[in-house]
Image (tube, helix red, strand yellow):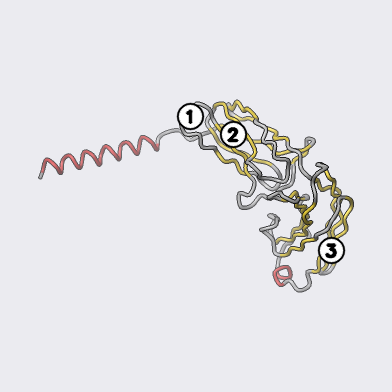
Amino acid sequence: MKKYTYIFLITIASFLLTGCGLDNYDAPQSKLHGKITYNGEALSLRGTGEAIQLQLYQDGYQLRDNIRVYVGQDGTFEALLFDGEYKLVTRDKNGPWVNTRDTIVVNLKGSTEVEVKVTPYFTISDESIKLTGSELNATFKVDKIVNSANIDYVTLLVSKTSFVDDVNNIARKDFKNQQPGTLNLSMDLSGNAKVAAAKALFARVGVRTVGADQSIYSDIVRLK
């Protein structure tokens, strides 16, 4: 019995020492950072819920699982990694842009900045979003970039935080049958208790393309 107890204790001690050794490995310190752009300008996107992702791959490893890189609502991203060569692509059928999935080879050492160029179906510009009393008024321009693209709906959104999208909001109104060009849309907020109680309000507009899983958005505007 003493012999088996001794072996058991040695086994546990070896396990603990091995675990401590694993904990002593250095954490990744190199930073990959960048933005998703069109014509050099970062795109405004949904940044909550890990909705838009990029994927990193490394050749020469038996496990070919990708490393997920999450994109913020201002189109920027970053990840801490070990030095090495990576292949960066957009996630399949994810985002308000043409699904080309061009591969970007990244040689990471220290800090590396990457620009991921995409072709959005539509863009939003010249937005003016104002709250007058209990009515939200938005004027903005929608340009069609891809000739075959069609607008599914346009959205007005209000949030009590600076994170505003089709999921994170306290007021939303969708408009169907919209065409590219200058749009003037409004939303009555008079019956919305959450809007009335909010200490701060933020807004933006979005355009969803038929067949796309995400909307393109305007910059965020603080209303109060």
Of circles 3 and 1, which is in front? 1
User: Which amino acid lies under the numbered mark 3 shown in the image of this protein?
Assistant: Ser
Name the N-terminal-most of marks 1 and 2. Answer: 2
Name the residue rendered at 77%, 61% in the picture: 174
**Marks 3 and 1 in Cβ contact (< 8 Å):** no
Quadrant where the N terminus sits is top left
Of circles 1 and 2, which is in front? 1
Q: How far apart are the two marked residues, 3 and 1, measured between alpha carbons?
A: 53 Å
The residue under label 3 is: 186
**Image coords of residue 27 (percent x, y):** 48, 35
Count of numbered tags: 3
User: Which amino acid lies under the numbered mark 2 shown in the image of this protein?
Assistant: Lys
Label 1 neighbourhood size at 10 Å, few (<14), some (14-19), many (20+)?
Answer: few
Q: Is residue 51 left or right of residue 27?
A: right
Label 2 neighbourhood size at 10 Å, few (<14), some (14-19), many (20+)?
Answer: some
Label 3: element kind: strand
Of circles 3 and 2, which is in front? 3
Name the N-terminal-most of marks 3 and 2. Answer: 2
Query: Front-most of 49 and 159?
Result: 49
The residue under label 2 is: 31
Quadrant where the C terminus sits is bottom right
Q: Is residue 209 left or right of residue 11?
A: right
Label 2: element kind: strand
Q: Quadrant of residue 161?
A: bottom right
User: Which amino acid lies under the numbered mark 1 shown in the image of this protein?
Assistant: Tyr
Name the residue rendered at 75%, 59% in the picture: 157
Label disc, if present, on residue 61 of the rendered structure: 1
**Image coords of residue 158 (percent x, y):** 74, 61
Q: Is residue 1 left or right of residue 129?
A: left
Label 1: element kind: loop
Name the N-terminal-most of marks 3 and 1. Answer: 1
Q: How far apart are the two marked residues, 3 and 2, measured between alpha carbons?
A: 42 Å
